[in-house]
Image: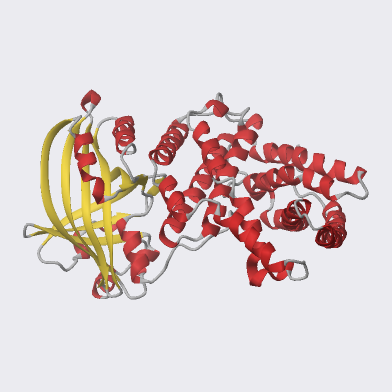
Amino acid sequence: MEIEIELKFIFNAKFADDLYNTLNKFHCISNKTQFLHNVYFDTATRRLRQFNMGLRVRSCAGKSVQTIKTAGRVIGGLHQRPEYNEPIEGLRPKLSCFKSKIWPDNCDVKQLESELTPIFSTDFERQTWLIEMAEGTLIEVAYDVGFIATNRGKVSLCEVELELVKGDEKQLFILGSEIAKLPHVRLGNVSKAQRGYMLTDNSTFQVKKLSHSEINPKHSIQQALLINMQHGLKQIQYHENCFIESGERQALKELLKGVKFLHQNIILFKNELDDLNKATWIEDLHWLARSFSWLDEYFIQLRLLENKAYYLRKLPKFKSLIKNIALQKEALPNDESIGELLTSSRYCQFILTFTQWLIQLEKQSFSDGESNNITLFSSKHLDKAWGHVSNTLKNDKILSAKQFLSYQGLLESNLLTGLSLGHVLSKQKSELFHRPWLDIKLGLNEFSMINIISEIAHDESDSTVQYEYFKWIKRKEDSLLHALQQSKQQALLKDVYWQVQK
């Protein structure tokens, strides 16, 4: 068995010369070019997939090697997977050649082999360079250009992989940092096999709401921080892939939630890890948040215009109003500029630097004991977060629209705190507690819609039309305030779920 440790980048073949020039800066021991034909096998019921295994037969220059890769893990663009290789004759897998210990208990290997069928293939030209780095570290750089093919068609692939052959893992990131400076490059957290299965099964990246982090009472505070940071990074990268493939703007909304989730965890854990809020990647995290700050405005305008602008149907100068809002929406960043950002050197460097920080954090040793109790930590922070909002709202019986809006940022932070820590205590009770607060958050989004009309109304020169606008705004605000007041009362009646015995 080998443990494959590699950084994977999605690349653009147009910039191959830039890649060659970058690699020429390093000490290259050897360089070669091969054509690789790879066939991936599984059963009709995807049993290998269920085992978190991938089975490939690779042929090159008349020789064949079968490979089993087990699940391993991916952090950012760093892939770490156990890998088992066996030379074979022909192109048909022979599972008995692998050591029996790799198979799950009660797995009938002969039966499994008899049910195997080709699922998809990858064919590509691979150029490799063996690079010698500091302290005797050897890194193999592979540049793959080709395609993935299934009975549903084919998709192109263009990747750069840096595999640690021997030596210091840090050198992998030093070389990776140079690759990240190239044009139109991004960290790849999806393997060729994953892409092949998705193409075969006609599946795509679907937008997923940010979920609770999977921490539990057994974790230390530092382990919880690591898990939460990985959770936020997965949310960002998954929806980066989703947008790149589909252009779906909802994916950007969830990507931004991932960014905000990371920021909230910096606030929560800043006193638990020395210099957490001084990490080198934080400035780029803030840059990314600013780069997508226009999304709230975009989705407000989108809601105003949906269903043929049904929400605005009773307002005067209806067509002119729609045109005004549509022009505002069109002035916001387009898909091309968003794609440029997500394939920019700065974005790629952020993901790479953050990945390296996570790897280093994982290797640190931390103290144990009651002071490191994640349950008490979660209870304390949830009590602090929601206590402030609850106590303030209890003192204000009737809130104005302006007062409700003043809680918008704090409410979003508290909900992110719940997603960060709520699972430690009770995911189900956490979701029940948050439900009326989420209703309030949705109501505040409608206030933002009303505010757009209010701004247009203030610029209206016709006093009669302006009066109709303000009358509509007043009616909408009164109705919304009534609904928010009811949600507020329901929220304040909810029992807290985070009290624990000390």
Image location of residue 462, percent across then percent down: 80, 58
Left or right of 449 in this view: 168? left
Image location of residue 455, percent across then percent down: 74, 51
Please state which of residues 163 and 178 is positioned toward the viewer in this rendering. 178
Q: Is residue 2 visible?
A: no
Residue depicted at 33% across the width and 55% down the height: 191
The total of numbered circles placed on residues is 0
Image location of residue 202, percent across then percent down: 38, 71
Please identify the quarter of the rendering in which residue 35 is found: bottom left
Residue depicted at 42% across the width and 44% down the height: 75
Residue placed furthest toward the front: 462
Residue depicted at 48% across the width and 28% down the height: 280
Image location of residue 157, percent across then percent down: 27, 57
Please state which of residues 93 and 163 is positioned toward the viewer in this rendering. 163
Residue depicted at 26% across the width and 41% down the height: 162
For the C terminus, which image quadrant? top right
Please state which of residues 379 and 355 is positioned toward the viewer in this rendering. 355
Please state which of residues 399 and 447 is positioned toward the viewer in this rendering. 447
Instruction: Establish if 7 lies above or below 196.
Output: above
